[in-house]
Image (cartoon, helix red, strand yellow):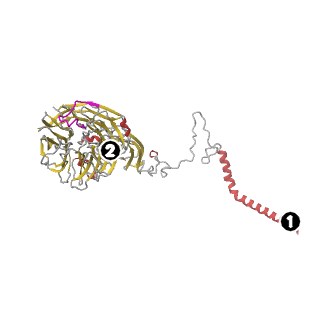
Amino acid sequence: MKIKTILLFSIILFSLLNLVSAGFSCGWDTYGSNYNLMPNYQYYNLCSSLFNQTNITTLTYGSGQSYNNTKTAFQPLVADLGQEGTPLLIFPNNNYLQLYDTNLNLVTEILIGQKANSQIDVGDLDGNGLVNDIAGIFYVNATNFAFRIYTYNSSTQLLTKHQEINFSGTGNDFGTNGLRCEGGNNGNYGTCYSVWYYTNGTHYLYNFIKFYGNGTYNSYQIGSGWYYGYPREPLSWTDWDNDGINEFLVWSDKSIIVFNGNNGAEEKLITTDPTNSDKRIRYAKFFVPLQTTTLSWIDKLFGNTATNQRLIYTMETGNTMGCGSGTYYGLNITSIKSDGSGSWSQCYGTTTSTEIMRTYGLAIADYNGDLKDDVWIVYGQSGLSPTTIFKIFKGEDGSSLYSQNTTPFNYAGSYPNTDLILSRLDNDAIPDFLVHTPNKVVVWSPTKNQQLFANSTITPSACISADLSYDGLQDIICTSSTSTTMFTPNYQNQNPTISSVTYDPATIVSANSPLNIIITAYDPENDPIQYSHQCSASDSWSENTYSSTQTCIYTSAGYFNSSIRIKDIFHTDNYTTFSQTILVTSTGTACNNNGVCEAGLSETYITCPSDCPAPPSQPAVNTTQTDYGGSPIPTKIVDTENTEQGLLPEIYYGILGFLSGTLSPMILLVFVIFFVLIMLTIGVIIKKIAHKVGDLR
């Protein structure tokens, strides 16, 4: 028997493993529009109570990772460098670039000579289709630097240096502003971007550098002069003014510069008074408050041509500025468009001179489900009466979507060294705040309006969230100048359950016609569910797909045991199954109307009266001799259908024969005689009555 299988309505999704191998890593969340470098469906869930039970693993390493005192430990990256479903933690550790497994066991390391000067990044920089290249800028000595690409070989588990470009520093304060890479595949080299800066003692000169995967680079001076302060954030970019050229964003505490990615020409400058120490920019980002369905997330992250892209920044003001009358220190949150239209601004001020407004993190993501970017911010006042406020603004107009004043973080005037992280750390579809201070890590849920997790035993410099074990649950990884700590949930991902299975058209089908098996399933963590089927017990299972409708076609009649099974993407071979017997006939019913009663096809008088005769009203009596001799006792005294059956068949049928054969012809004569007798009797009665009446006269 030959059985064909068809998979209908397949929905093609990238699994987590394919996603990582597509060229992106978890981490360095300040890039682009702050989407954690992954599409939404990767971020799956923890129940809110699970963070109360955490497993903590700590890796201790050397002190400091940079000559520049303004930089401490860099944010780690998480990537599947071998495309084998095994994520690795990647970060520089003193004079080594190291890779660790998800239990923080060292996998491999390579001597980099001196410490890292920038954040590292991962990509397919040599264009060979493998996302196994690690880029960074490292010290050679106190005044010389090198941009390097290291390549990881998953077979040998070794790192080798692939490219190196050397350059020298100038002045007393110099360095690079982060590093960020893109592109690289199908034979095309990737590109990494950074800003090199140095000072003349008062001002800073910025140079935009493009490093290419083939070992070459271009460098452009940004703008036409000197700026105040060294760059604070890694680069982000987009086609901000829709001219077909990507603009890049870099900022210091005094200036925000939007510049042309082709030549470094300044296109937009927002600056504070360089002589006024009471004005300070804290965060600046590009974002796109429009229907994200018009842009892919990768376009949105790495440059797109939307028509209403915005720049958002926060600026803290000093004691004499505030937000108007009655306020002292202030925090301005401002959003502008490249064409100057639709700008909005919010200001929050302190009411006493002892409190100072602070920005603790800024991020971009959709909050209210309208597929538009919203602005997430953590801010508050520090001083004698500290506050911490989680706030979400509507990206288009700055109206408030969420606000909650919580227990103060006790920043004591310090700031996080990296940006606010947004990640789905509970069991809903809305991201949660992951923010750290120099002495605390906090997860806050806006949907549950409560703190999910807090830890104050470490001193983090940078935190990220990533699914290290590919179980659908987010882990938290934090680094400091002396250690890396990983928080993993004390929870096991549950397999989905089958709610119902429907067979269309029915469990009885005709040969060579499709049988659609429609499955309704539920996953406790809302993980993507994969489906497969087996048309009969002798068939192999079909490939796993994301379609909840599976289809079989049977080419011959008979009974078949059809099975379906489901699992979520974080289980390998742990399936939930369901089976059903399927009857296949030539007509799709249990009767083929061929004049032959075929019990093998379940034809009976009830289901197929045209092929099967009516059964006898009573079963025939067994007259065969038993093992003990004699005949069985009849179950009837008289059998009206069989003259050979019954207890006394001769007597019964003798009497019945006499009555029917002899008396039946005499019935009419008997009736006539009986009628005459009745009439005579009536006549006699009438005569007697007449005589009585006559005597009375």
| Residue 622 seen in render | yes
| Residue 474 seen in render | no
* Quarter of the view holding residue 133: top left
Percent x, y of residue 270: 19, 49
Relative horizontal placement of residue 629, taking residue 283 as reference (left or right): right
Residue depicted at x 25% and y 55% = 342
Q: CA distance from mark 2 to mark 1?
A: 128 Å
**Residue on which the image places disc 1:** 692
Q: Which SS class for mark 2?
A: strand
* Quarter of the view holding residue 165: top left
> In what quadrant of the picture does the C terminus appear?
bottom right
User: For this rendering, which residue is in front, 235 or 22?
Assistant: 235
Q: Image height check: is 361 above or below 59?
A: below
* Quarter of the view holding residue 426: top left
The kind of residue on which mark 2 rests is: Ile
The kind of residue on which mark 1 rests is: Lys
**Circle 1 crowding by C-alpha within 10 Å: few under 14, some 14–19, many from 20:** few
Percent x, y of residue 559: 42, 44
**Residue on which the image places disc 2:** 389
> In what quadrant of the picture does the N terminus appear?
top left
Classified by dominant secondary structure, the portion drawn in magenta counts as: loop
